[in-house]
Amino acid sequence: MSQVVVPDIGDFKEVEVIEVLVKPGDAVTKEQSLITLESDKATMEIPSPSDGVVRELKIKVGDKVSKGAPILELDAKEKAKSAPEKPKPAERSNSDSLTVPVPDIGDFKEVEVIEVLVKPGDAIAKEQSLITLESDKATMEIPSPGAGVVQSIKVKVGDKVSKGSPILVLQSSGTTKQEAKAAPQPAAAVPQPVPAAAAAPRPVPREPREETKTKPHASPSVRKFARELGVDLTQVQGSGPKGRILHTDVQAFVKGALSGKTVSSVKSGGTLPFNLPAWPEVDFAKFGPIESKPLPRIQKLSGPYLHRNWISIPHVTQFDEADITDLEAFRKAQTAETEKRKDKPFKLTMLAFMIKACVTALKTYPQFNSSLDKSGESLIIKKYFHIGVAVDTPGGLVVPVVRDADRKGVFDVASELAEISKLARDGRLKPGDMQGGTFSISSLGGIGGSFFTPIINAPEVAILGVSRSSLKPVYSGKNEKGEDQFKARLILPIALSYDHRVVDGATAARFTTFLVSVLSDIRKSIL
């Protein structure tokens, strides 16, 4: 029995464990990855020093570790080998030029070049990253040993390189021989289990550049796994820390693709999914005067989620109309009382009645008060009723939640609505105030419009859109002369958007029909 510890990982201390790749009882081979660590500059996988069987784990995801921290207990069969040989210095091709080779990258050989970060003519600084290499265990950037101008590139994306392979020819800018010999090591070289005295690769800060912003956030083993399965990681949504793509995310993507459920996630302005053409880039200024305004913060935050919900949920919208003539008369009669309260006056709005009516309908049709689990194969029915209400604020739309609406009277709901609406408009809502909703209502009745299609607020499966009520003639039978009669009634348009994976059209029609009947006779909400 031997204890495997975190080897020398250079200047990194208190590095977070973001993946544990083995479990007790697993048989592991030498060099097999055990855990994945991530700092602000590098992602690295710690390999096993020998073959064996995992007996006990000493860490978990989220732990912070440094050199020497115990990882696990291993029934080992082979001891780790000695440290890699010393780095080969850069060589000068003439008095002014310097051929920059791949430095010592440990036991890695024939490592693939996945990015070339400079081009001929570029002026580069000392320690600026030149290329990115990726093995099955690490992604690493190779820094420049000195400042200068790139004369020529000796590698291209897809090439396999090892220690000493030429990267480029650098027109020297004050680079001395001593600097060349002390060429720094790659930023994210994977630590090998070497003796404590062995020199470790020195981390180098990444140069900021546009390409890294769109590069999928995944470990080398996940990238290799994705390549083996033919998965484009740019289309996989990560569920790990900081959006990191895990093995399980790739598996879920493949499973979804086989079942026809996979939907790509796309950043604004990028290549669209489903083999559609790229978003058009237009110089609007050439057609006339323009003004550029930044999006409000709320829209910046909510936009990607609305986009995700729209393209990943099969929306269907059921439209209907409710006769709220009697309900409106009752509301007006009660409003006079609520507005005169001495302790805490408030306005009794139609939205409070809508919430109570929706709760009654959700109890009758519980699948509307549910969510799909992550696998998409089970439905989670919620026994609580937290209703989200879209509130228009100067900064954009927010959706605070009225909790346990089934346990509150319509006066309590109306009073709470007044409070959370004020908090929303003042920008004082807390994150918890907008979490945990089971069903949402978006009401535009105070503004206008007949019908609209609201977007479902995932992970909910339905949302009700409410438009402006208006007086309409409604047939009321025949008079004594046998003539058709019509009466003016207050009609409220409603629109129910639902997830067609969970709810079929017939059930949606029954839900809206039942909701209309409750709104037409509010006494049903207490049955």
Image (cartoon, rainbow, N blue to C red):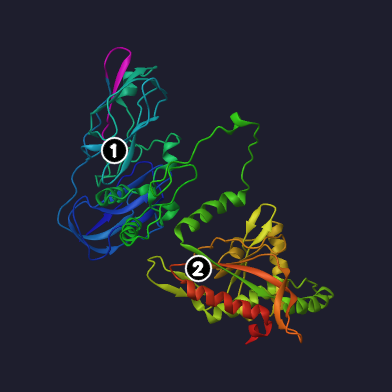
Q: Position of residue 49 (x, y in %)?
A: 21, 51
**Mark positioned earlier in the residue sequence (1 or 2):** 1
Q: Nearer the viewer, residue 9 or 157?
A: 157
Q: Position of residue 78 (x, y in %)?
A: 15, 53
Q: Residue visible at 70% across and 60% down?
A: 448
Q: Is residue 415 left or right of residue 270?
A: right
Magenta span includes 64: no
Q: Which residues are magenta?
A: 92-105
Q: Secondary structure at mark 1?
A: loop
Number of residue marks: 2
- Which residue corresponds to mark 2? 461
How crowded pointer 2 is (Cα within 10 Å; few <14, some 14-19, many 20+) is rated as many
- Which residue corresponds to mark 1? 199
Q: Secondary structure at mark 2?
A: loop
Q: Position of residue 509 (x, y in %)?
A: 53, 74
Magenta span includes 100: yes
Q: For residue 147, say whether it is visible.
A: yes
